[in-house]
Amino acid sequence: MIKVGDTLPATTLMEYSEVEGEGCSIGPNPVPVDKATAGKTIALFALPGAFTPTCSAKHVPGYVAKAAEFTAAGVDEIWCVSVNDAFVMGAWARDQKTDGKVRMLGDGDAAFAKATGLTLDLNGKGMGLRSNRYSMLVRDGKVVTLNVEAPGQFAVSDADTLLAQAKA
């Protein structure tokens, strides 16, 4: 499992872009993790799946509401990563009104989740391999803090926990 001090895996996440710009087309666009984190501070949180009740009611809205506070604490970007495709993440971004405050990144084949060792096997429930629920603060591609949820818990992946760590 990835730990504090480790570099994020050099995988590629996917992001749905609503508008064309800076070399990206409308639709799914690759986000190479190593390049996208270089020289930046990222507040990253991962969830098992888009549109899940707790994630839609608590986690994503919490990060959207505190986006300005994250920026004031020196965070360049907030990322939500889930084992879904870019189209689903784009639809979830519209539903959650993330409006550029939170980047909704798809890990469709679970490559990022597998490479971090933060997977949740829900094959027996018909949902396949998913991501654990966790949050981390990343500086220049290196993990500074890591908060991994125990199954059924919803305490450390929320915006308040990671914001306090960003301010520290």
Image (spheres, helix red, strand yellow):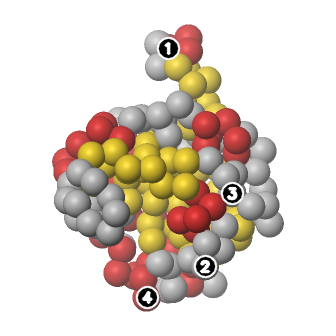
Q: Disc 2 or 1, which lies upstream in sequence?
A: 2
CA gap between label 1 and label 4 equals: 41 Å
Q: Is residue 137 left or right of residue 75?
A: right
Q: Position of residue 130 (x, y in %)?
A: 54, 31
> The residue under label 2 is which amino acid type?
Gly
Task: Please tell me whether mark 4 sits on a helix, a strand or a loop.
Answer: helix
Instruction: Quarter of the image for the C terminus: give it.
Output: bottom right
Q: Nearer the viewer, residue 29 or 82?
A: 29
Viewer-side label of 4, 2:
2
The residue tagged 2 is 39
Label 1: few (<14), some (14–19) or many (≥20) C-alpha neighbours in 10 Å: few
> The residue under label 1 is which amino acid type?
Lys
Residue at 26% across, 66% down: 21
**In this picture, is 83 found above or below 103?**
above
The residue tagged 3 is 8
Q: Disc 3 or 1, which lies upstream in sequence?
A: 3
> The residue under label 4 is which amino acid type?
Ala
Q: Position of residue 157 (x, y in %)?
A: 53, 55
Q: Is residue 157 visible?
A: no
The residue tagged 1 is 125
Q: Disc 4 or 2, which lies upstream in sequence?
A: 2
CA gap between label 2 and label 1 equals: 40 Å
Q: Disc 3 or 2, which lies upstream in sequence?
A: 3
Instruction: Quarter of the image for the N terminus: give it.
Output: top right
CA gap between label 3 and label 1 equals: 29 Å
The residue tagged 4 is 72
CA gap between label 3 and label 2 equals: 13 Å
Tell me whether the residue at label 3 lies in contact with that at label 1, contact meaning CB atoms closer than 8 angstroms: no
**In this picture, is 8 found above or below 142?**
above
Label 3: few (<14), some (14–19) or many (≥20) C-alpha neighbours in 10 Å: many
Q: Is residue 6 left or right of residue 104?
A: right
